[in-house]
Image: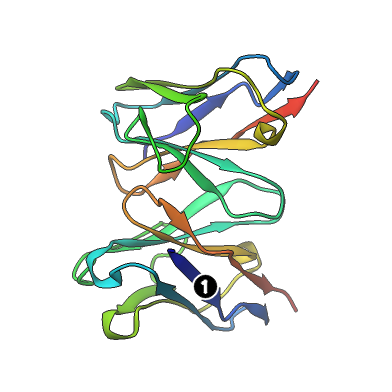
Amino acid sequence: EIVLTQSPATLSLSPGERATLSCRASQSVSSYLAWYQQKPGRAPRLLIYDASNRATGIPARFSGSGSGTDFTLTISSLEPEDFAVYYCQQRSNWPRTFGQGTKVEIK
Amino acid sequence: EVQLVESGGGLVQPGGSLRLSCVASGFTFSTYEMNWVRQAPGKGLEWVSYISSSGSTIYYADSVKGRFTISRDNAQNSLYLQMNSLRAEDTAVYYCARGSSSRDWGQGTLVTVSS
């Protein structure tokens, strides 16, 4: 099973600041990595698929990069609605696995 | 507009069974792979099961293998999860999600396993 490790667990930032979230895989997942945003009481929302492709309707301030084992989600300038929990997921191997999540909170 | 609506959750005793349903609309259901993903209270996301568009290929997480069965009815635009031998640790919100990258999700249905 591929283990995805997200860091940091919590990121405390102010609106307007840049957020950099990391996801590291225990073995290569090529570019088959997605990022999701989840707000309390809501279903997850796909932000990025296949490492760097923004999903439909996702603002340009969200970007993804990386391949192999190291991936990054960047939010260029945090908006108030971006404070949430973010998960990465690989679709390279079975079983599909998620990272444990990074909470982006208001500082 | 893509819609996924789950139902069938509820309170069940350990060892019991439940069948979850997910009704899809707004897209050609028969052409999409589907997944079930769950989230225990206060915890992260856990992938549960996958089914190909035709239903011919199926995968399960080890934690549910042998107890849960995924299926679909393309004529009814519906996805199912039959859950047997339920345990307390199966307590979670269960989501259905569309596609290999889970681009669309339902609102979820809560399953509580408790005596």
At horizontal 28% and vertical 42% (from top left) the residue drawn is A93
Q: Residues within 10 Å of mark 1 (few under 14, many from 20)?
A: some
Residue B3 at x, y percent in the picture: 47, 67
Residue A100 in view (yes/no): no
The quarter in which the N terminus of chain A is drawn is: top left
Callout 1: chain: B
With A88 as the anchor, is B14 left or right in this view?
right
At horizontal 18% and vertical 70% (from top left) the residue drawn is B56
Residue A82 in view (yes/no): yes
Tell me, what colour scheme is on the image? rainbow
Would you place residue B56 above or below residue B33 in this image? below
With A97 as the anchor, is A12 left or right in this view?
right
Q: What amino acid is labelled 1 in the image?
A: Val
Q: Nearer the viewer, residue B54 or B41?
A: B54
The quarter in which the C terminus of chain A is drawn is: top right
Residue B12 at x, y percent in the picture: 66, 81
Residue B34 at x, y percent in the picture: 35, 63
In this rendering, the count of numbered labels is 1
Which residue reaches farthest top?
A: A17
Describe the element under mark 1 as helix, strand or loop.
strand
Residue A14 at x, y percent in the picture: 75, 18
Which residue reaches farthest right?
A: A107
Residue denoted by label 1: B5
At horizontal 40% and vertical 40% (from top left) the residue drawn is A55
Q: Nearer the viewer, residue B45 or A63?
A: A63
